[in-house]
Image: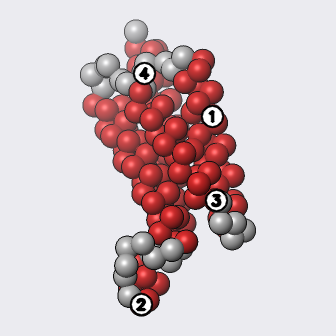
Amino acid sequence: MKQLSNIETWVMLAGGLLMVVGSGASLLLQAWAPYVFAPGALMFAAMQMRQRYEGDNFTIRRLRRMMLLSDGLFLMAALLMFANQSNFFQLNYLSYIKYVHNNWIVVLLVAAILQLYTSHRIANELEKEAKKR
């Protein structure tokens, strides 16, 4: 895997921290929470997309695609956080409650589980690959 520079690493850490602060603030019903979560999700996802894998290990490539899916889900959670504050999709009340209201939590949970799984599996696969050499 391509290593990030120090600045990119700090941007990724800051993005993760902003995501944690934004999601926690949203659970505490703070109106500014999506405005903190969304830039954090963008920063985190952008830095993960900059990390590339140039090898030919199929397992790592598959895990990398799963990680990119997780990044997309983080961005979708940010969009749903904004939609949770106001009905900008112009849905009727029952559809809004069914499809939008607080569903960002489910999307965020799925993204976090995928992120946790892939990060540990990629680390293990890279370690195996390094031992083979």
Q: Residue at x 51, y 64 (%)?
A: 82
Disc 3 to disc 4, C-alpha distance? 33 Å
- Precedes in sequence: disc 3 or disc 2: 3
Q: Which quarter of the figure is the C terminus placed in?
A: top left
Residue 110 in view, yes or no? no
Residue 9 in view, yes or no? yes
Q: Residue at x 46, y 40 (%)?
A: 45
Instruction: Give the residue type that dot 4 points to.
Output: Met
Disc 2: which residue: 94
Q: Which mark is residue 1?
A: 4
Disc 1 to disc 4, C-alpha distance? 18 Å
Disc 1: which residue: 13
Q: Which quarter of the figure is the N terminus placed in?
A: top left
- Precedes in sequence: disc 3 or disc 4: 4
Disc 1 to disc 3, C-alpha distance? 18 Å
Between 51 and 123, which is closer to the camera in this rendering? 51
Q: Nearer the viewer, mark 1 or mark 3?
A: 3
Disc 3: which residue: 33
Instruction: Give the residue type that dot 1 points to.
Output: Leu
Secondary element at image label 1 = helix
Residue 3 location (% of width, % of height): 49, 18
- Precedes in sequence: disc 2 or disc 4: 4
Secondary element at image label 4 = loop
Q: Nearer the viewer, mark 2 or mark 4?
A: 2
Mark 1 and mark 4 residues within 8 Å of each other at the beta carbon? no
